[in-house]
Structure formats: structure tokens, C-alpha cells
Image (cartoon, helix red, strand yellow):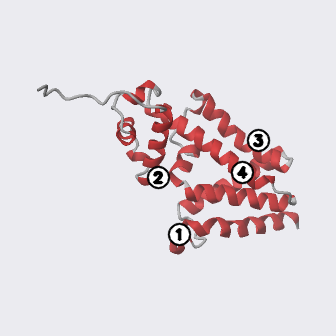
């Protein structure tokens, strides 16, 4: 009988996708500090060396996960912006969608747009996906500068809510209430600007 430990074989249909899914699960359940290539491999059920088949480093995996999250956010923003409505309602809809995404995917949201990936330019897919958020909002509003201003406003609001700097009811009722209450704030902001 052979008593040597056996390494788990590399037999995986789509290893890169499994690693990204494992990383997202760790982000959601344990946070960014718990995410390493080793923990992702363990979660995906592959050997500790397997992630290196697709990712040279933890940062490369995080950049891929963040780019995938940005693509998902872009799709949700496009859906919110696609309904026929006036520009004020479109801003509120975009802001609500952005805040719903942040509330549902807090760990991923912080990774996508936080300081964990300071070398975004080293990952073209990530840099392009990040830049596209502002462009998409600008296109939806028909105003590039306005799109960046709306993005900055809703992102700042999202961070203030996630950090519990302002309380829109999330401290007592949870993050699920924040997007609808934030939409009320955004509508108030839009109405103030129009006045």
C-alpha cells in the first residue's frame, strides 16, 4: 500500500470561472482579508497550485473578479437607465441600481472600486471596465460630464451608507432599505438642482 500523500489532480471544466466564483464567495462571506490564492483553491476544491494556471498572483485574480463585477454592475445600470423616463427619473433609477448593487455585493463592490487594486493600468480589462461605468452613465444621460458627476455622487453616497457615516435606516433595518431611501435623497438633489 502506498502511503504517499496524493495531490488533487487537475481536472476541472472551467477552472478560471470556478476560481472567480470561489473568490466572490469568500468576499461575500469572509471579506477581502480572508481571500488568498490558497483559500480560493481550497474553496474551489483544487490543488493549491491550480490557480497559478490562470493567475500569476492574488492581484491578478482580484483584478479579474473586479472586472467581472464591473461588467455585472454595467448590465444592471443599463437596465435601470433603459426604461423610458425623463432625465431626473433616469438619474434616480441609475442611483438606485448602483446602491442596490453595493448593498447586495458589498465585498465585491469595495474590491471593484476601492484601493485594493492600485495598479489598475496593469490589468487592461479592469481599467476598461472601470472607465466604462462613467461612460455608460454619461451616455444614458446624454452628458459625459453629468455622467461622471452622477457616478461620483452615487458612489460617495454608497460609501457613506456602507461605512455607516450616514444612517438611512440601514443600522436598524439592514442594507436592503438603503437603496430606496437613497433614491429619495437623489430625487431631492435633482429637484434642488432643477430649481
Using the numbered discs, state the Cα–Cα distance from disc 3 to disc 1 in whole angstroms.
31 Å
Q: Which label number is shown at residue 77?
A: 4
Of discs 4 and 3, which sits in the foreground? Answer: 4
Q: Secondary structure at mark 3?
A: helix
x, y percentage for residue 163?
53, 60
Q: Residues within 10 Å of mark 4 (few under 14, many from 20)?
A: many
Using the numbered discs, state the Cα–Cα distance from disc 4 to disc 2 in whole angstroms.
21 Å
In which quadrant of the rendered image does the N terminus lie?
top left
Q: Residues within 10 Å of mark 3 (few under 14, many from 20)?
A: some
Q: Residue at x 23, y 28 (%)?
A: 6
Using the numbered discs, state the Cα–Cα distance from disc 2 to disc 3 in whole angstroms.
28 Å
Question: How many numbered circles does the render carry?
Answer: 4
Q: Residues within 10 Å of mark 1 (few under 14, many from 20)?
A: few
Of discs 2 and 3, which sits in the foreground? Answer: 2
Task: Using the image as rendered, state which of residue 92 and residue 117 is in the foreground.
Answer: 92
Relative to residue 179, is residue 169 depicted above or below? below
Q: Residue at x 59, y 44 (%)?
A: 69
Q: Which residue is mark 3?
A: 135
Q: Which residue is mark 2?
A: 28
Quarter of the image where one finds residue 192:
bottom right
Amino acid at each position: 500500500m502506498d502511503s504517499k500523500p496524493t495531490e488533487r489532480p487537475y481536472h476541472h471544466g472551467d477552472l478560471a470561472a470556478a476560481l472567480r466564483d470561489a473568490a466572490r464567495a469568500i468576499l461575500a462571506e469572509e471579506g477581502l482579508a480572508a481571500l488568498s490564492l490558497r483559500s480560493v483553491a481550497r474553496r474551489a476544491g483544487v490543488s493549491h497550485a491550480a490557480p497559478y494556471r490562470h493567475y500569476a498572483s492574488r492581484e491578478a485574480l482580484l483584478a479579474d473578479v473586479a472586472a467581472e463585477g464591473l461588467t455585472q454592475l454595467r448590465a444592471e445600470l443599463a437596465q435601470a437607465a433603459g426604461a423610458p423616463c425623463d432625465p431626473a427619473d433616469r438619474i434616480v433609477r441609475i442611483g438606485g441600481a448602483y446602491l442596490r448593487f453595493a448593498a447586495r455585493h458589498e465585498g465585491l463592490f469595495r474590491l471593484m472600486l476601492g484601493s485594493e487594486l492600485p495598479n489598475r493600468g496593469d490589468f487592461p480589462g479592469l481599467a476598461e471596465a472601470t472607465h466604462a461605468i462613467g461612460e455608460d452613465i454619461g451616455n444614458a444621460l446624454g452628458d459625459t460630464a453629468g455622467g461622471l458627476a452622477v457616478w461620483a455622487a452615487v458612489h460617495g453616497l454608497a460609501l457613506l451608507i456602507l461605512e455607516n457615516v450616514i444612517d438611512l435606516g440601514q443600522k436598524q433595518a439592514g442594507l436592503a432599505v438603503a437603496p430606496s431611501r437613497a433614491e429619495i435623497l437623489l430625487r431631492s438633489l435633482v429637484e434642488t438642482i432643477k430649481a
